[in-house]
Image (spheres, coloured by chain):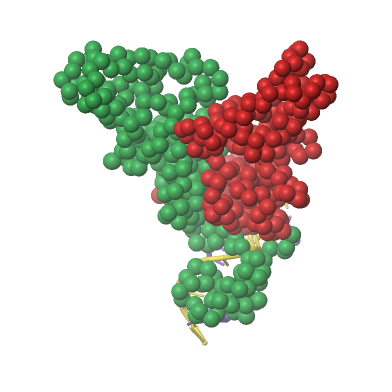
Chain colours: A red, B green, C purple, D yellow
Amino acid sequence: MKPSVGIRDVAQHAGVSNATVSNVLNRPDVVAPATRQRVLAAIAQLGFVRNESARQLRAGRSRVLAYVVLDAANPFFTDVARGVEDAAREAGFALFLCNSASDDGREREYLELLHEQRVEGILITPVDADSARFAELVNRGTPVVLVDRETTDGTRCSVAVDDVLGGELAVTHLIENGHTRIAMVGGPMSIQQVRDRHEGALRALANAGLPAGALTVLDTKGLQVAEGRGAERGWLACPPRAVPRRRSAPTTCSRSACCSR
Amino acid sequence: MKPSVGIRDVAQHAGVSNATVSNVLNRPDVVAPATRQRVLAAIAQLGFVRNESARQLRAGRSRVLAYVVLDAANPFFTDVARGVEDAAREAGFALFLCNSASDDGREREYLELLHEQRVEGILITPVDADSARFAELVNRGTPVVLVDRETTDGTRCSVAVDDVLGGELAVTHLIENGHTRIAMVGGPMSIQQVRDRHEGALRALANAGLPAGALTVLDTKGLQVAEGRGAERGWLACPPRAVPRRRSAPTTCSRSACCSR
DNA sequence: TTGTATGCGTTATCAC
DNA sequence: GTGATAACGCATACAA
């Protein structure tokens, strides 16, 4: 266990000042190529690793985002997480995943932790979208985005799949292929997303001038009667790939009807 | 966006010194109940949230662990993650989940980030268990535990399911119930875990004095031929519940043969 | 029991 | 292009 090598050690080893080392770390272009090489060599040789705590304390920023998922075992959320991660990476941010496991206490603890860590932003699929907790964070200056959830007053940032549009697209597709007797398999209707898809399906029928009776709804009550882990966790196997982008232009998901979340 | 309220603001608002505030935060027992209440009130009123960067910089510790999973969408890993999280919580640590997505580059980036963050310990199911990366971390003083993987020289810490024992238990169970013609459905044999289970199955037969021929192996080549997301991700649906504890006393998993990882 | 003073490792502002 | 130096916010001896 090496006695933590700092920026000063590197500086000394390279025969420069600590400021120069900091510069090759943060603004490599401002330091002479020769010295830069020397410093980089010293860094490699000493195995220096920048202390983020100190950096963050001084610099203010953290280059870290967090996504608090409702259930790390739900494929929907892991898919979204994957997309979030990709986007974060591209923007030069790292992503920490936290699993509230649908537990309000855990969620609170994680948000507190993330707040203390001063992460740059938080994505969350909350246990309760209307929780007062988010206001505090936002007031402190930490952006919070609700994922696949909305506050009832619609006052907070959120991204979500447009399930109405999803249902509409699916049924429109069938209609365009000449089908006139269509079944919607899904449920239970107590789930907002399922209701939305149903609404979309009906809208598609209306658009095509078909009677509402053309749609047979098969309520699977999936979440209640299915057995095994899936049911326990509140989902059934399904492979949606689309990841929501922003509120104003929701991504459509042609398979939206397959996933409970 | 409030102008970040610090420990000094709290102190002033409570009419005490910053040291006292720090004490009620870290050693509440050492400060007089009256002042403690006053400080706590000030904290609540001002909405003070301790800056972990500063705390960590000064204190050295971070109270954060990390688990780098190979595939956040694989139920096996989410199950393990859940167990890790529970244990971490109980010990007063928070857990950050990172998803390498079986990508060596991502894994490297996350380890670097975690190193910079000076997390207290790292659990990881690595892309390559023999990677030289772990030595660096361990040298620096960050404990690293391999999950469900081992180095070929067995030199590094690891926790893993004892698949040999799993296979043995499963087949022994069948034998004890009077079965003599047994089939093992699983594969491909190129996977270490599958081979281990097979070995365990054979051992069970031997123990019972049955010929090896009593076991029919049905190699499903699951990971290669299965279609859809599961295959893509390298797993098939399965519900193991057991979580490995420590190396010396591996948890048995009666369903171990159902999950590829 | 509480206050004063110092330093953690880094970044940023200046002179040089 | 580079070096000295002052914060950042908190924890902790040590003094009061």
Q: Position of residue A148 (x, y in %)?
A: 67, 40
Total marks drawn? Answer: 0
Name the side, left or right, on which B61 lies relative to A125.
left
| Residue drawn where x is 44% and y is 39% of the image | B80
Q: Is residue B212 above or below residue A132?
A: above
| Residue drawn where x is 77% and y is 25% of the image | A212
Q: Is residue B52 above or below residue A90?
A: below
Q: Position of residue B73 (x, y in %)?
A: 53, 32
| Residue drawn where x is 31% and y is 17% of the image | B183
Q: Is residue A221 above or below residue B29?
A: above
Name the side, left or right, on which A60 lies relative to B139.
right
| Residue drawn where x is 50% and y is 48% of the image | B95
Q: Quadrant of residue A150?
A: top right
Q: Position of residue B21 (x, y in %)?
A: 56, 73
Q: Quadrant of residue A199?
A: top right
Name the side, left or right, on which A203 lies relative to A260.
right
Q: Is residue D3 above or below residue A212?
A: below
Quadrant holding the N terminus of chain B? bottom right
Most foreground residue, A7 or B156: B156
Name the side, left or right, on which B184 lies relative to A183.
left
Quadrant holding the C terminus of chain B? top left
Is any part of residue A27 visible from this angle? no
